[in-house]
Amino acid sequence: MPVVAMMQNIMVERHKLLSNEDILDGISLSTLLPGPNVVMVVAYVAYHLRGGIGAFVSVLAFMLPAFLLVVSLTIAYLKWGQLPMINKLFLGFVPAVSAIIIYSAWNFARKTITNKIEIFLGITAACLLLGIGGFYITLFVIFSSGILGWFIFHNSQTEKADTNSEVQQLILNKIFSIKFLLTVIFFVSLFIAFVIPLPIIEQNSLAHIAITFFGISLLLFGGGLVSIPLIQEIVVYTLGWVTQAEFITAIAMGQMTPGPIMISVAFIGYKIQGFLGAVIASIAIFFPPILLMIIASKVHKLLKKSARIQAALKGIRAVVVGIIFSTAIIIGQNVAIHWASLVIFIMALIVMFRWHINVVWIIPVSGIFGLLFY
């Protein structure tokens, strides 16, 4: 996480505004909550310096360059994307994106999978998504893994003795309780609208865009990579907002920007409702994690000490690995049958596994290679 390292250098070492423990708390919280880790750490740091307003302003400043770059690339693609030269450029992106997802899934598995039960959960999730697929299967896999993890991985002896007293203290805090209750009602209401679409909301409306990406954001345990299969399932196969080729292009654009990969939703929003659609899609997918981070920062000790929460997340992270691997296979099915595709795929894997080259460089180089040899 280069951005986090830069924040640590600026905030802790140079300006001494925070301690190393503060940064580490932000990182640990970002792993407990759904959403892009880097954006959430930015929100955490800004919240501790300037409160809630500071958190939202900082995230806006952090995301704006990436958003504008994706929108600019989207406009160019939608205007000139059917030109043979542009098609060749994007043909090179597809095998590179597949390789990037495999590399990221492997790294995630290496840090997450620790026993045979987690391996089984990951393989089962991948098989369900590849064999059956569908939006509701994806929801089932994520929620059931959390429930299984809650019971399978929980060790009652690891639960801290003071957790119950902390919970009681939070409940007795009237102001916090009211805010918490209103927030829960807000999140639950929109999530229900996401799972059970309302007939009064048109499919391509701004409201539907907002509800869709809001719901997706609440399922992104494990970082931005989880957004790829979830968004693909919904916007490509369920809603038909973009084609598979356009979706892969959006992911490639997100990889080329300095921001998180989830900024790719700006492409989808723009395709449906223009610039305003891009804005709504981006806000909807980043707003919930930021709000959750602000709320969670008040109770981070409770979250870190709760063995039940850790156990549930352990189950979710196991299936996340399977979900990501299955996405690499699905996207790989769209690779052009050409010797250049195999070369791009293998070379991308080699430079990432051997030299850990940043993916920001892999996508444009793969595009140039596609332009030359397809």
Image (cartoon, rainbow, N blue to C red):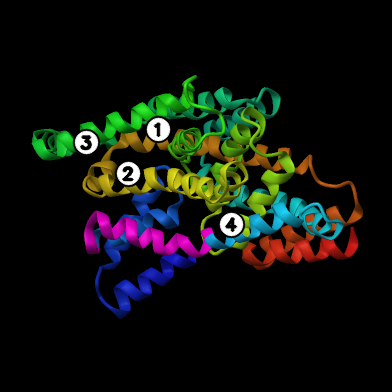
Kindly state the secondary structure of the residue where label 1 is placed: helix
Decide which of tag 3 and tag 4 comes sooner along the chain: 4
Query: According to the image, label 4 marks what residue?
Result: 71
Q: What residue type is labelled 4?
A: Val
Q: Percent position (x, y) of residue 116?
A: 56, 33
- When the figure is inspected, residue 50 is found, relative to residue 97, above or below; the finding is below
Q: In this view, does 111 lie to the left or right of 171?
A: right
Q: Is residue 165 left or right of residue 209?
A: left
Q: In this view, does 148 lie to the left or right of 117?
A: left
- In the rendering, which numbered label is found on residue 112? none
Q: Nearer the viewer, mark 2 or mark 1?
A: 2
Q: Percent position (x, y) of residue 316?
A: 47, 35
Give the magenta-colored segment's residue range.
49-67
Q: Percent position (x, y) of residue 130?
A: 69, 29
Q: Within 10 angstroms of label 4, few (less than 14), some, or many (20 or more) residues?
A: many
Q: What residue type is labelled 1?
A: Ala
Decide which of tag 1 and tag 3 comes sooner along the chain: 3
Instruction: Write the residue at 42% across / 69% down.
Output: 5
Instruction: Write the residue at 52% across / 45% down.
Output: 277
- For this orientation, the residue located farthest to the bottom is 14
Q: Quadrant of the C terminus?
A: bottom right
- In the rendering, which numbered label is found on residue 312? 1
- Secondary structure that dominates the magenta span: helix
- In the rendering, which numbered label is found on residue 180? 3
Q: What residue type is labelled 2?
A: Leu
Kindly state the secondary structure of the residue where label 3 is placed: helix
